[in-house]
Amino acid sequence: MRKTLGKFSVDYLQILDEHGVVTGVMPKITNERIREMYEQMVRARVFDETALKLQREGRIGTYASIRGQEASNIGTAFAMDKEDWLFPSFREDGTMIARGFPMSALLQYWGWDERGMAVPQDVNIFTIAVPVSTQIAHAVGYAWAMKLQKKKVASVVYFGDGATSKGDFHEGLNFAGTFALPVVFICQNNQWSISMPRSKQSASETLAQKAIAYGFEGIQVDGNDIFAVYTAVRDAVKKAKEGRGPTLIECFTYRMSDHTTSDDAKKYRDAAEVVEWEKKDPITRLRFYMKQKKMWTETYERELLERVRKEVDEAVRTYESTPPADIEDIFRYTYAEMPPALREQLEYLKRSVDETKNMGGTNG
């Protein structure tokens, strides 16, 4: 016997096409707010370009570029309220910056200094998660806590298309759907999970439809359209806070750069594909719109770039002028109370460092 469950569909949302033409219903948003969105996207790109240069010069470690995904980053930041919590993966620098995370601290993190993830007290952002999909469980757990405490706070978690093949994804969505938790799942489907194309990641026509199996809504949006991302996330956050459960948002976007600075996408990706996606650049798209609405001029752009580059340069100076971490921190913060074996190792290290300094002094 076959049980008929009925047909399902997944909505696709686009408001601004690649030519900057409005094709859907514009959200209620002021021109001033649109400029702020544009400026944050430009800030994110300048930060990204600077970070890539720093990595090539050996001034930070391996870095994951966000180029081409600025709308999927910034649209979310503007749709969230201050009290909401963000759980990032490793490709949300733009979202974090727009939410108030210091650029100098981000550079410190990418420079292999974990002190960069000492999140300021007034910034509701969890630490960056590099292991694929582990942050989903954290976000769901936080949402569960908010529901138990009857607090109107949404938990927003980012992950890539590759994460949808991991157990954490399915366990997280199942738990969130079962208990109608106030969490928004945002999949940045940038078409590539390192060298694995989306076509080999899942047989599902969309990734958004995976939410249906867990009892809640999934929606696919044009991830290069900041108005679509903003609208979808805003509506999902509102729904979460009203106790109407979670939402899965698939941002259909593209990773313009290599997976990280340790990757070479030319080995597995057709250059023509990249060229086609460059035409859909989210920053260029919003600029087209703003120009049509008399909100953008070359003078405005020049002054904006000058200001943002100064901000990023200052962040670099702050990062590089920060004294290195005390090597003893490795021992201090492993346990609440240092066990004898670890204390012995610490004492040995301190003696070795002192002997090295003395030898250097003698040779000098």
Image (spheres, rainbow, N blue to C red):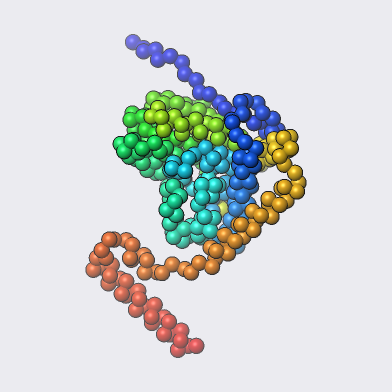
**Residue 246 position in % (x across, y down):** 41, 31
Position of residue 13 in the picture relative to residue 284 (left or right): left
Q: In the current view of this chain or complex, which residue is farthest to the right?
A: 298
Q: Position of residue 249 (x, y in %)?
A: 49, 32
Residue 49 as seen in the image, left or right of residue 301:
left
Q: Quadrant of residue 227?
A: top right
Q: How many marks?
A: 0
Quadrant where the N terminus sits is top left
The residue sitting at 33% across, 28% down in the picture is 178
Counting from the top left corner in percent of width and height, residue 158 is at: 47, 40
Q: Is residue 164 above or below residue 345?
A: above
| Residue at x-position 45% and y-position 50% | 123
Direction from residue 322 to residue 16 in the image, left or right: right
| Residue 25 visible within the image | yes
- In the image, 327 versus 116, the foreground residue is 116
Q: Is residue 182 above or below residue 337?
A: above
Q: Is residue 111 above or below residue 96?
A: below
Which residue corresponds to the image point at 47% horizontal and 68% vertical from the top-left? Answer: 324
Q: Residue at x 64, y 58 (%)?
A: 310
**Residue that extends furthest to the top in the rendered view of this protein:** 1
Q: Position of residue 25 (x, y in %)?
A: 61, 25
Q: Residue furthest left?
A: 340
Q: In this view of the protein, which residue sits in the foreground, 86 or 130?
A: 86
The answer to which quarter of the image holds residue 245 is top left
Q: 56 or 10, which is in the foreground?
A: 10
Q: Residue 275: in sight, yes or no?
A: no
